[in-house]
Image (cartoon, grey):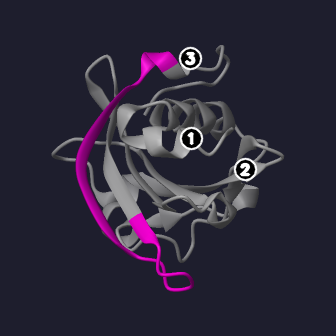
Amino acid sequence: MVDVSGREPPDWRSFEIEQTGSSNGRCDCCGTTTNRVWGFVRREGAPVAAWFTGWTEGRPEHGAAFDLILGEWGDDAPKEARFAVALDYRVIDQKGEFMVVDAEGRADQNHILAATALKRSEVIGTPLVPLTFAIVDAIYMSKPLAPLRVWNV
């Protein structure tokens, strides 16, 4: 994991976003197409996080979910060395905003990749904040998330 203690927050442009998969389905409430994309975040070639993002096409009022798995990566790193952080993305007054939320009960893959799902209160006010927002900004600005950026009109 990128160490941010006592340093300037990382620049979102320092992260490379790799998409490794995608799927789609239908929204339970409106029947509109939903999209889910996921992949890895790297910095200087080293893995920093896994990411999962889901949204409903053309429905900014539904928002989008961003789930990050942070911690240690590599062949020998157990899931106990990783934790989940969750954010919701909403468009308010034509401006996109991220908010950290409880990761408990979010995406199904969290329990496979991480032993711990952090609560909002375990993230806010900690050194995780600058790292989390730099990573989520990099994901948001990546090519796979271009459909979300049209929500900010």
Q: Secondary structure at mark 2?
A: strand
Label 3 to label 2, Cα distance in Å?
23 Å
Disc 2 vs disc 1: which is toward the camera?
Answer: 1
- Visible residue check, residue 78: yes
- Please report whichever mark, 3 or 2, sits nearer to the chain's N-terminal start: 3
Up the image or down, 76 lies above or below 58; here it is: above
Residue 130: horizontal and vertical position, in percent? Answer: 65, 31
Asked if the stretch drawn in magenta spans residue 61, the answer is no
The residue to which callout 1 is attached is: 150
Label 2 to label 1, Cα distance in Å?
11 Å
Residue 47: horizontal and vertical position, in percent? Answer: 30, 33
Name the residue furthest right. 93
Quick one: label 1, few (<14), some, or many (20+) residues within 10 Å?
few
The residue drawn where x is 56% and y is 40% is 150
Up the image or down, 129 lies above or below 3; here it is: below
Residue 121: horizontal and vertical position, in percent? Answer: 76, 58
Residue 11: horizontal and vertical position, in percent? Answer: 56, 17
